[in-house]
Structure formats: C-alpha cells, structure tokens
Image (spheres, grey):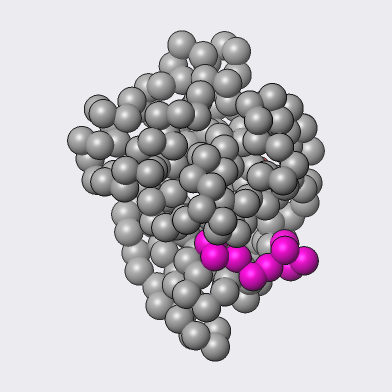
C-alpha cells in the first residue's frame, strides 16, 4: 500500500509514509471487508459511511503538516483510521462524530491499539461547530463535505493553522485554508474529491 499507492504518487513526507505503514488499516474495516483493507479504494463502514481511500488519508495528513505535539481536530471520526494516523504522527487529536454507533466502535479499536484517552479524544456531536473548548488547533482535518467552509472551524485555527477540508455538493474539491493572522485566511484548491456529505447543522444546498 505505502509503496504502490502513496510513495509512487505524491506522498513524499517520510513521517506520513511511516505512520501509514504502522497503523493497521484492517482493524478499522468491517470484518466482511477485511480482504480489501489495503486496496486502493474507499470502503463502506457502518451507518452508510465510508473509510477514505488510503491515498486520500495520506494526502490530507501531509497537507495538514502535523508535528509531534500538534493539536489537531478531526471532524468525522468514522472508523477512527484517520485519527489513528494523526495520533501516530505525535499529534493530540480531538475527533467528533455525529453517529454514536461509529464513535463507539472507533473508540474500542483506537483504545485497543494503544491510542488512549490522552492521544485521541472522542466526542459524539455535530462537527459543524467544532470543539471550542479545545481550540485553538494547529490543524483541522474534515472528512465529510459541507457546501462551504464552516466559519467556526476557521475561527478555531490558531494563526498559521491549516484546515484541510472537502467542500461542495455534487462537485467537491479538497481545499486547504490557512489562517494567516487576525482571522485573515488564504485558500488553495488541491484536487477533486468525493466525500460523504457533512450533516448536522451544515446548510443544505
Ligand atoms: N475519517 C473517517 C472517515 C469517515 S467518513 C475514517 O477515517 O474512517 C465521514 C464521517 O463524517 C462519517 O462517519 C459521518 O458520520 C461523519 N459526519 C458527517 N457529518 C458530520 C458532522 N456534522 N459532524 C460530525 N461528523 C459528521
């Protein structure tokens, strides 16, 4: 997976490649899908959601520029896989999931793999509002697509912090929003993506 799907493409950050090599993706995939855990595609998980393709997880992680000790918010815990990769890079992770069932399963797997309370904090709720008590964050990784960038998430970035987020409804693109200073932002579009929609308080369009 790491050689053929990541290093051969544009994943060049050695720390990201190492984290992707260490986190056992099969543990985050439903039993029936285990045989496909390391294939080059997204896979279904419970509640009609998906665990992203390994390349997309790696690309988003690389774009977030996570350092050891970084405070990182994830919106959309899902299986817990992306949270584990972020924790493996040495980040302290706060991850929000709107489906209680997914959060519970993710918690069990994460704790079992040693990503304990101090490394990954989990909450059931609506990520549209972020996690204000734990802000500001060095990076925010969103794994469900809202129609536009949630203002609360930009507000919860520290100056210099990076928000990596799929945006759009029918046509989505991955964006990196960097908070420059005093709430000023710089936005870049990275590549087209297809994520499940962000639900909860995210406006429908
Ligand atoms: N990062 C996950 C990918 C999960 S797919 C992984 O590594 O497996 C996106 C997830 O976002 C789904 O589990 C979905 O339930 C969740 N989600 C959608 N809207 C949300 C919202 N408003 N707040 C929190 N989670 C949300």
Residue located at (37% from left, 22% from top): 39
Looking at the rendering, the stretch of residues picked out in magenta corresponds to 131-140
Residue located at (35% from left, 69% from top): 188
- Which residue is nearer to you in this view: 39 or 113? 113
Point out the image quarter for the N terminus: top left
Q: Is residue 149 left or right of residue 12?
A: right
Hey, which quadrant is residue 133 in on the image? Answer: bottom right
In x, y percent, where is residue 128? 67, 61
Residue located at (45% from left, 81% from top): 180
Residue 163: say if magenta.
Answer: no
Point out the image quarter for the C terminus: bottom right
182 versus 169 height, above or below: below
**Residue sticking out furthest to the left:** 8
Q: Is residue 204 left or right of residue 13?
A: right
- Which residue is nearer to you in this view: 68 or 181? 68
- Number of numbered callouts drawn: 0
In x, y percent, where is residue 190? 32, 59
In x, y percent, where is residue 191? 32, 54
Residue 50 seen anywhere in this rendered image of the structure: yes
- Which residue is nearer to you in this view: 56 or 144? 56
In x, y percent, where is residue 23? 50, 29
Residue 86 seen anywhere in this rendered image of the structure: no
110 versus 169 height, above or below: above
Q: Is residue 85 left or right of residue 97?
A: left
47 versus 168 height, above or below: above
């Amino acid at each position: 997976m790491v050689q053929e799907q990541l290093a051969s493409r544009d994943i060049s950050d050695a720390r990201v490649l190492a984290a992707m090599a260490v986190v056992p993706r099969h543990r985050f995939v439903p039993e029936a899908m285990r045989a496909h855990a390391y294939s080059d595609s997204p896979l279904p998980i419970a509640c009609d959601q998906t665990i992203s393709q390994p390349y997309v997880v790696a690309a988003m992680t690389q774009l977030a520029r996570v350092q050891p000790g970084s405070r990182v918010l994830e919106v959309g815990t899902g299986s817990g896989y992306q949270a584990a990769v972020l924790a493996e890079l040495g980040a302290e992770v706060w991850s929000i999931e709107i489906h209680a069932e997914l959060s519970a399963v993710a918690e069990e797997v994460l704790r079992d793999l040693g990503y304990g309370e101090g490394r990954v904090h989990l909450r059931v709720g609506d990520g549209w509002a972020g996690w204000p008590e734990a802000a500001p964050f060095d990076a925010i990784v969103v794994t469900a697509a809202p129609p536009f960038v949630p203002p609360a998430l930009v507000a919860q970035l520290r100056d210099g912090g990076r928000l990596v987020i799929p945006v759009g409804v029918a046509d989505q693109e991955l964006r990196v929003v960097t908070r420059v200073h005093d709430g000023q932002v710089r936005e870049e579009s990275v590549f087209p993506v297809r994520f499940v929609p962000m639900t909860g308080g995210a406006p429908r369009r």
